[in-house]
Image (cartoon, rainbow, N blue to C red):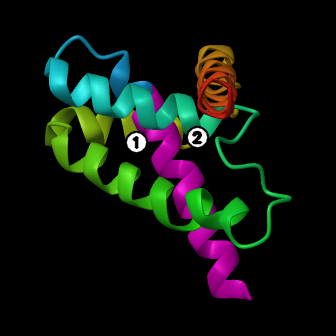
Amino acid sequence: MQKLKQWARQLKKQIMILYYAVRDPRMPWHAKLVAAMVAAYALSPIDVIPDFIPVLGYLDDVILLPIGIWLALKLIPAEVRREAAVKAENAKRPVSKLGAAVIILVWIVGIAAVFAILW
C-alpha cells in the first residue's frame, strides 16, 4: 500500500512539472502541445471515463495518464524539466477549467454521435 501511495505522489509531482514546463518559452511546440493536453486532462475535475464505471473507470487513471506523462516528460528539454521540477516541489495543485471543458465537449460529441447512429 505504501508503494502505491508513493507512486501516486510521484504522478502528482510529474503532472505539476508538466504544468510549469508548458509555460516555459523554451519548450518546443510539439512538446508543449503534448504536455498541455496531458496536464489539462490530469488537472481536470472531470474524467473522460467516469470512475464509477467498473474497470474502465480507472483505466485512464492507471494506464493512459502514466503513459501520457511519460511521453510528455520525454519531449521536454532537460533544463526546462529541471527548472519545472523545482517550481513543482512546493506548488499547490491547480484545477484545469479548460481540461474540464474539453472533456465535456468530448462527452457531448460522443452522445450526439450515438444519437445520430441510433436515429
> Which is closer to the viewer, label 1 or label 2?
2
Q: Main secondary structure of the magenta part?
A: helix
Q: Nearer the viewer, residue 91 or 103?
A: 103
- Point 37% across, 15% down: residue: 23
Magenta includes 3?
Answer: yes
What are the residue bounds of the magenta stretch? 1-19
Residue 43, located in which quarter of the rendered image? top right
- Residue 98 on the magenta segment: no
Residue 111 x %, y %: 69, 29
Image position of 41 (left or right of 69): right
Badge 1 amino acid = Ala
| Residue in the image at 60% along x and 22% along y | 109
The residue identified by callout 1 is 85
Residue at 53 percent of width and 58 percent of height: 11
Residue 94 shows in the view:
no
Classify 49 as above or below 8.
above
For the question of whether residue 90 can be seen, the reply is: yes
Residue 19 position in % (x across, y down): 47, 29
* Furthest residue toward right: 52
The quarter of the rendered structure image containing the N terminus is: bottom right
Foreground: 92 or 72? Answer: 72
Q: Is residue 36 above or below residue 89?
A: above
In this rendering, position of residue 68 left or right of residue 107: left
Q: Which x, y percent locates residue 74? A: 20, 50
Task: Give the image quarter of residue 114.
Answer: top right
Provide the residue designation for mark 2.
42
- Looking at the image, which is closer to me, 96 or 17? 96
Where is the C terminus found, in terms of image quarters?
Answer: top right
Q: Would you say 108 lies left or right of 33 here?
A: right
